[in-house]
Amino acid sequence: MRIISGKYKGRRIQAPKNLPVRPTTDMSKEALFNILNNQFNFSELTILDLFAGTGNISYEFASRGSDTIVCVDGDMGCVNFIRKTAAEFEFDIVPIKSDVFAFLEKHQESYDIVFADPPYDMAQKDFEKIPELVFKNNLVANEGVLVIEHSKHTKLDHLQHFSSARNYGGSVFSFFELKSEE
């Protein structure tokens, strides 16, 4: 995997082969960040990266200037890899080993961008729990966004706060936002 933009543009990061991950492809990541770049100033963002895996998405935010990034993953190997890589690059990333759903139930802070990249084969009902818990617990700041990466076979457009979806090959990014009352 490589960092596609920012201070560390072009730097490659080699994750251990034994991690239980499916990193976001460079093409999909570039498309996602093009969308976000039109909405946000990265240097002012707070980020929550759920099912963080290798930390691929968090490194991209950090390279672009975001300095408050929390990564959550249930695999200790992933958490250790994120911690090691963040230290090497001097990124301000806080990796947390936790079941993502348990974390979402208890966590109290809000973020400008919440990104979730759960396993594509996770049950539909568990995918649906992510936006439910994120918005119930006010984890998305005003004018913030929740982005869930999933396969084209998972449908999330019927859920509350859904705003749009973008397809990239077999991957989909579903965007969720608080709609202001008019």
Image (cartoon, rainbow, N blue to C red):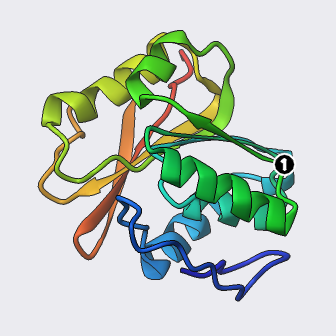
Q: Residue furthest bottom?
A: 10
Query: Residue 20 at x, y = what percent?
Result: 35, 58
Q: Residue at x 17, y 44 (%)?
A: 155
Q: Is residue 160 visible?
A: no
Quarter of the image for residue 140 reads: top right
Q: Is residue 84 left or right of residue 128?
A: right
Depicted 134 relative to depicted 62: above or below = above
Query: Residue 12 at x, y = what percent?
Result: 64, 85
Q: Nearer the viewer, residue 42 or 119?
A: 119
Q: Is residue 109 visible?
A: yes
Dot 1 amino acid type: Asp
Query: Residue 7 at x, y = what percent?
Result: 85, 76
Q: Residue at x 45, y 81 (%)?
A: 27
Q: Residue at x 82, y 68 (%)?
A: 89
Residue assigned mark 1: 67
Mark count: 1
Classify mark 1: helix, strand or loop: loop
Q: Is residue 109 left or right of residue 146?
A: right
Query: Residue 54 at x, y = what percent?
Result: 52, 61
Depicted 83 relative to depicted 26: above or below = above
Q: Residue at x 23, y 30 (%)?
A: 126
Q: Which of the image's four quarters has the C terminus? A: top right
Depicted 70 relative to depicted 1: above or below = above
